[in-house]
Amino acid sequence: MLLTVTDLTLQRLKQRLWLHWFGDAAPSPFPPLPSADNAPALLKRSLQRRLLRARWASAVLWLVGLPFLYGLSLLTRLEAQRRQTLQQKAPGLPTGLAIAVGNLIVGGTGKTPLVIHLAKTFRQQGHQVAVLSRGYKRGGPRALRQSELVLGPDCKDPATGLLISPEATGDEPWLIALRAKVPVAIGQDRYLAAAKLLQHFPETTLWLLDDGLSQTSLNPDVRILLLDHRGLGNGHCLPYGPLRMQWTDKLIQKWSEPTDNPGPPPQAATLVLAHPKGQTYENLFESKGQPSPSRLAVSRSAAGWMRLSIRPNANDQDSGPQLSLHEESLSLEEGCQRFKADERPIVAAAGIAQPHAFFESLKALGLPVRHTLALANHHPDPLQAVLAWMQGERIPKNCILLTTEKDAVKLAWQGPKPSSLPDVIEWWALQLELSIEPSSLESVYGWKTT
């Protein structure tokens, strides 16, 4: 079926906006416009007319809308400055060291994998670690979403001992508790969330704030600014640029000043830069007349395959059936060999900020993926979206579905089996591991690393 002029225009505008944000620094995640040369003879002329109209319409809308986007970016910048002022005035935690992990740029840069890695690393060193999360895209009634919730390291409510669903917590906090085996407190107010967590885990000595650079309820001791290959784009705030807040010398000074928080003082500068190995960002600080801070060179790689299932316990007859969590795993090599040798078609679906990056990872592993589905980030119901997509694309149900860990935690709750996908569908999630050189952690925090 041919795309409409409206669809082609929107696709063209997305490509223009991405190019305006990043130039040639990052490949566009959006597919290129279809080529009329490859269209069947009967449809070729119709597609040519639609493409021509779409290009003209997108050019006019771009020229008209660009000043409007710039005006909105000024409002974004003012709101970000207001939030930073509130954060500086917010209280610090009375006990333990609070480390905020965040980014400036829109879209996924790997904050959650970094939080998981830091939590596992410091827990292995003997620190009592807890994570504070906003719980983005939590489900349920409004009153429940605004309240604080504590998730134990076993993904259970520490007060009742019952499993908590990812819908109640958000997919990222649930994944952090599952992978890092640390308690997670979820709430808009990070200070109140920490207080509630201390009721169940009073021995906590180290706090990690997932996406904690723009929250206003807690003033952290250390800030880790995470960048990826896109850098800061064109340097402007949303929607004229990709930034959540403007990168200025004033912001650098705020983030580098020692805090007045009680408890142990930070043993290094309060601003730490984390970025992909092999890429340097000294110019971000030198151009503002500021010294470059301590840095963590991070890298991510595929580590294995996993899938989850939620099953009722057979021994809970008196108190009613309770749910238990089960996890299956395959090594990376074992899974790839198994999928390649299987005659069933391989398809992939991803509901993350940059789904194209996930599909590229599968391609790099040599997996012959036939169809891909890019879902919205934090998609509330990936199961129904996948089923509708398979039906619309006429994908055979005897296939292998590959997805992300963030989607896997929701698929696990869709039914009594690994998911309520048809029994003939076998699904697996690709596990990604992040690595940091131990010496860089030691230089930043002054703690002995293993």
Image: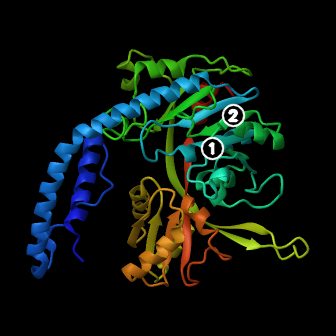
Q: Earlier in the sequence, mark 1 or mark 2?
A: 1
Image-based side of 275 in relation to 120, left or right: left
Who's the residue at 66% across and 24% down the image? Answer: 446
Pinpoint residue 235: horizontal percent, then vertical percent.
33, 32
Who's the residue at 65% across and 38% down the image? Answer: 189
Image-based side of 195 in relation to 408, left or right: right
Pinpoint residue 67: horizontal percent, then vertical percent.
23, 37
Q: Residue furthest top?
A: 289
Who's the residue at 66% across and 31% down the image? Answer: 98
The mark lying in front, picked from 1 and 2, is 2
Q: Amino acid at mark 1?
A: Ser
Q: Which mark is residue 133?
A: 1
> Splitting the image into 4 quarters, where does residue 417 fall?
bottom right
Q: Secondary structure at mark 1?
A: strand
Who's the residue at 76% across and 42% down the image? Answer: 197
The relative height of residue 348 versus residue 24 in the rendered view (above or below) is below
> Splitting the image into 4 quarters, where does residue 11 fall?
bottom left
Callout 1 environment at 10 Å: few (<14), some (14 to 19), or many (20+)?
A: many
Image-based side of 236 in relation to 320, left or right: left
Q: Secondary structure at mark 2?
A: helix
Image-based side of 231 in relation to 447, left or right: left
Pinpoint residue 159: horizontal percent, then vertical percent.
83, 52
In which quadrant will I find the N terminus? bottom left
Pinpoint residue 113: horizontal percent, then vertical percent.
56, 47
Residue placed under numbered mark 2 in the picture: 191
